[in-house]
Amino acid sequence: MDARERVDAIIHAYLDEIEQVKKDSGLSGLFGFGKAPKNDPANDRFLGGMKNEIGFIASEQLSSKELCEVLKTIYTAQDTRQDFVYYVLIAVHGETMPLIAGLAPEDAAILLKMYETRFPRNQRLPVQDLLIGELRRQAGVPGKQERGLFSWHKRDQERRNTKDGQS
């Protein structure tokens, strides 16, 4: 079983386990009584299992193409943004950052484009912005120009510094 298949098996086992937990819980957890599926130990087991598997993959000498396939499997695990499972799967994205260093620039660029398309900027969590930054660095793509309340000040400083250096 290769790395992508192992990751896929862990993800599908987790999704199946959570589906069963949701079915078994019924209205449990409603109004704070009982046990809600989002508090089930399956979530922690999944995160721990993925962290271990990602650590193992990092120690293997995989090619850039193989790493790209593993990361695509992780990043495209599930589309629904309706429940806690989405956020658990996104939490795993942060654990993949050490793997990005093993990507060739062209593979990092492919993943970057896929990731930015799949997760629009206005719906991203901070860990996803960090991940996109890592993919940009690995792909050799410059970051977007900083915008914000004080960005005019930084641009002004840069202009002054270049004028001082030229004069």
Image: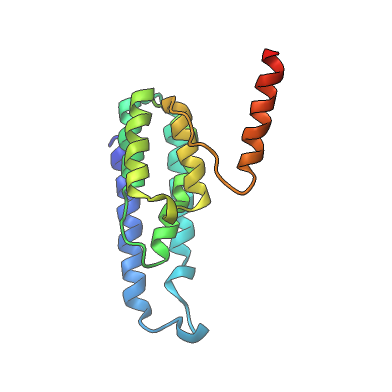
Where does the image place residue 21, in percent across and percent down from the top left?
36, 71
At horizontal 49% and vertical 53% (from top left) the residue drawn is 125
Q: Position of residue 153 (x, y in %)?
A: 66, 39
Total labels: the figure holds 0
Establish if 101 lies above or below 122.
above
Residue 14: x %, y % from top left: 36, 58
Q: Is residue 165 visible?
A: yes
Left or right position of 114 against 163: left
Foreground: 143 or 64?
Answer: 143
State the colouring used for the structure image: rainbow
Residue at point 32%, 51% (across, down) = 77
- In the displayed structure image, the side of residue 9 where residue 161 appears, left or right: right
* Residue that extends furthest to the top in the rendered view of this protein: 167
Q: Position of residue 36 (x, y in %)?
A: 45, 75
Q: Is residue 58 visible?
A: no
Q: Quadrant of residue 156?
A: top right
